[in-house]
Image: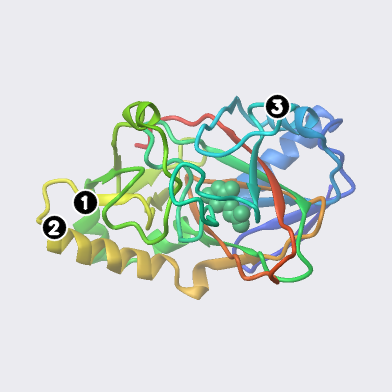
Amino acid sequence: MQQQKLGPHMAVAVEGIDLATATADTQAALVDALHDNLVLCVRGQKLPPVAFRDAMARFGVPVKRLQLASTPECDEVNIISSEDRDELGDGKKLVNGASWHTDDSFMREPCSLTMLYGVMVPSRGGDTQFTNMYAAYEALAPEMKARIDGLQVVHKYQSSRQTNRVSRRPESEMKAMPEATHPLVRTHPETGRKALYLNANRMEQIVGMERAESDALLDQLIAHAIEPRFQYRHVWRQGDVVIWDNRCTMHKANADYPEGERRLMHRVVVAGTAPV
Ligand code: OGA
Ligand code: MN
């Protein structure tokens, strides 16, 4: 398997593989590459929705997400598009994932992996940025590691600290999304490594800490984690399937492509377990 490092400390690309027909050995090598590099880009895929879902099912159990539209062909394949609007809210354009986040952290069992497939990519812009949360944790001063050890954070779909709008959801759906409490430092269940677990858009407050102090500490940790030295920026090519591990990365969308150009992504997430 031909691998090409994309960033100095994270992200790898592979070419010459069809995800729909990869052998068991190739599949195992892809999973290893993902664990070692946190972000895996498989170039040149041609996957209609059902085939995309089935290929992703080899990495985990695909789960439905109601917060995003789905393709008519397959419920588990969501759509991220330049045409996205806040349908139940103000009807205006909505950029999903415009601030630094990890997927589903408002849920008690957030997805482990997200797979995004570049169906239509703009001529320029629309990159996805990633940050390495193992490296961000490891680079903390020993005093900070000691301070945050054991702290828990409340995450919410609609956090009062949110930095970008999220789509308005029906009342019934909101009720089915109670807030979740997660550790600030989590241990990856497969690699055993520790990572900071932050979400600029969903974290509400550190449990048992006064609001002002909690805000200051969360702001400080986010600012640290998104320093350029921990980042990789993915420039999309049509046919890329980019798989990232939400347990040790954050990511961010950029809606900076030319007005009038389309960006269409298909998206699958696979089930994860409660962070510990
Ligand atoms: C997502 C997401 C970023 C992008 O699919 O979870 O945040 O660049 N996407 O579209
Ligand atoms: Mn996201």
From what the image shows, is residue 194 above or below residue 252?
above
Which residue corresponds to the image point at 62% horizontal and 67% vertical from the top-left? 233
Say which element carries label 3.
loop
Disc 1 CB within 8 Å of nearest ligand 2 atom: no
> Mark 3 Cα within 10 Å, few/some/many (few <14, many 20+)?
some
Point out which mark residue 205 bears. 1
Point out which mark residue 74 bears. 3
Say which element carries label 1.
strand
Q: Tag 1 or tag 2, which sits nearer the N-term?
A: 1
Front residue of 165 and 268: 165
Q: Which residue is mark 2?
A: 211
CB atoms of marks 3 and 2 within 8 Å: no
Which residue corresponds to the image point at 86% horizontal and 50% vertical from the top-left? 44
The residue furthest bottom is 228
The residue furthest front is 90
Quarter of the rendering containing residue 268:
top right
Which residue corresponds to the image point at 65% horizontal and 42% vertical from the top-left? 79
> Disc 3 marks which amino acid?
Cys
